[in-house]
Amino acid sequence: MIPLAHYIGLSAMLFAIGAAGVLVRRNALIVFMSVELMLNASHLGLVAFSRFREALDGQVLVFFGMTVAAAEVAVGLAIIIAVFRSRKTVNIDELRSLNG
Amino acid sequence: MSAQIAFYVLALGALVSALGVVLVRNPITSALNLVVSLCFVAGLYALLEAHFVAAVQVTVYAGAIMVLFTFVIMLLDLGTVPARTGPPEGIPKATIMGALGAAFVGLVIHAVRGDIRVPTTAGMAPERVAELGGNSRLVGELLFGPYLLPFEVAGVLLLVALVGTVVMAKRDSVAKSTASRRNS
């Protein structure tokens, strides 16, 4: 039996990689994919705790999380497409009009 | 023992392909790395006896969502966006992020070192789950039992997202057609 700490450590590593991607990369699509990576890492933590608590509610929560992720990806990609149409770029360094 | 080998292989695969998502230049390669990473994590879910979630991860996440991603990447044709030239000013930022990430991981591992004790009051051990008809059946009974209202709300959320996506993706062409109507 693999200890719970291993799963939590792996989840933290995946989350850190995703967070680094969000903050370092400039392509909006890759930033978005890194957000998915972070979400996935948190799901892994939830499933691991659900297994070790011997309760299935965590897996139901992950299912809802995936539903919300699907909705979020659809809307987010539509926003990126709309931005690309009006600005001809998805580089987040060039999308600064809300920056004051 | 075999479970341990499986865990370390899956964990290593998930980490390497997650690094691939962040480090690779080409967005398509990045997306394919993410698919691989999600599949490895699905394997970890299966290892955790969460069979239903593992299946949903592969079909919905690695399947549907990533197809949407690759579709949009190819639609926007980002291969034509030139790579940045000149001295990479992002290096200090990347170093800071790496240090912060390592610190975060270190803190988490320090916090969970040793053996974590979690209460097992629900009593759904894998043997009991198998006895009651399997993981998918029990998760389904939870979804359509105590979690029925959230389940229906999730359906409404998906509908809202669907309508919102169509409106947002069409807004440009609608604006253009009204503008051309005004001009003519």
Image (spheres, coloured by chain):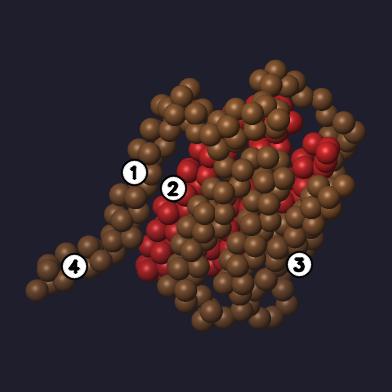
Chain colours: A red, B brown
Mark yes or no: residue B75 visible.
yes
Between B81 and B93, the one lying in front of the other is B81
Dot 3 and dot 1 within a common chain: yes
Q: Nearer the viewer, mark 2 or mark 3?
A: 2
Q: Which residue is mark 1?
A: B160
Left or right of B78? Residue B29 is right
Which numbered disc covers residue B91?
3
Q: Which residue is mark 2?
A: A71
Dot 2 and dot 1 within a common chain: no
Label 3 sits on a secondary structure element that is helix
Dot 2 and dot 3 within a common chain: no
Q: CA distance from mark 3 to mark 4?
A: 45 Å
The residue type indicated by label 3 comes to: Ile
Left or right of B170? Residue B73 is right
Between B47 and A46, the one lying in front of the other is B47
Q: CA distance from mark 2 to mark 3?
A: 34 Å
Label 3 with label 4: CB-CB less than 8 Å: no
